Amino acid sequence: MEFDWRRAIDLNCEKLCDIAFRLLVMAGIQAGRSNPFLPRHLYLRILAILRPAEFAARRLIAMAACKLELKVGPVRPRSPTDPSSPPRGEDTKACERSELAEVGEGQNDAASTAPRIPAFALFDPFKPFPEPWLTPEEIAALDNPSARLFIPASPPNEPVDARALGRRIRALANALTDLDGQALRLARWRARRAAGFGKPVRLSPFRPGLPPGWTKRPKTEVEQVLKECNYLGLEAWDTT
């Protein structure tokens, strides 16, 4: 019996939509408004749910792009004079943004005063490789008993800037309500790569390894959705 991809996509999309709605409520985003500041404890709680939900949504979009019947249309190479093409020497991230400028990107909001909601990122961000946990100055200060190494923790109710967080929540909610459109964006990118057009900046929308928030024994709804979408997304991308 063939696996019912349509049903799996719909079920996981419904679960992610519920999670996105809860995030909108938690962040106080209602009727086009958003809170520019949130208490630090609430900001961190939202971020702990939002990040795995974004990774799950990217895998859900990959499932839809690979397993649903989408009309990709004719595949054409980008014009050298295309203003959306990045100039030579621009970083990899900018190249990816240019490559993924498809359906849903560049749309203006109806209200001129409303903030622009960026298109949902179809590709996982690369794993960060930050500086060592301790800087050379901090390592040298370990031998100095009078040096102050630890900074007191910030108050949990301290207000923090949540405007970028609100845009990410809106982008996630918009992508889930337009799943077919997001899947078409990724299907077009894959068709161009299969036709040999474009610079191969990325070969897959997934980064190596397990996504953040993945656990072997999920305890929350977002962990359960992420685990299922990660397995099905990899399966759909590798077997198509």
Image (cartoon, rainbow, N blue to C red):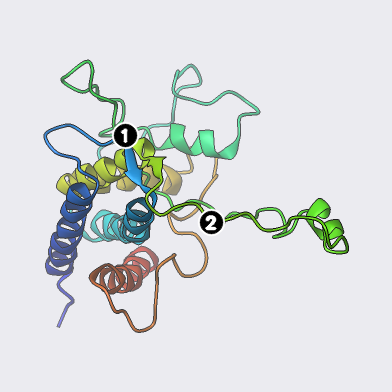
Provide the residue designation for mark 2. Answer: 153
The label on residue 69 is none
Q: Of discs 1 and 2, which sits in the foreground?
A: 2
Residue ID at (36%, 46%): 191
Secondary structure beneath disc 2?
loop
Left or right, 134 with reference to 217 = right
The kind of residue tagged 1 is: Pro
- Residue 60 seen in this snapshot: yes
Q: Is residue 124 above or below residue 222?
A: above
Q: Nearer the viewer, residue 53 or 11?
A: 53
Q: Nearer the viewer, residue 169 or 240?
A: 169
The quarter holding residue 66 reads bottom left
| Mark 1 to mark 2 CA distance (whole Å) | 22 Å
The quarter holding residue 143 reads bottom right
Q: Nearer the viewer, residue 234 or 199?
A: 234
Provide the residue designation for mark 1. Answer: 36
Quadrant housing the N terminus: bottom left
Q: Is residue 25 above or below residue 105?
A: below
Residue ID at (14%, 64%): 6
Q: Is residue 42 above or below residue 74?
A: below
Q: Measured from the top left, where is residue 239 in percent x and y? A: 35, 69
Q: Measured from the top left, where is residue 228 in percent x and y? A: 28, 73
Secondary structure beneath disc 1?
loop
The kind of residue tagged 2 is: Ala
Q: Measured from the top left, where is residue 27 in percent x and y? A: 24, 46
- Residue 70 seen in this snapshot: no
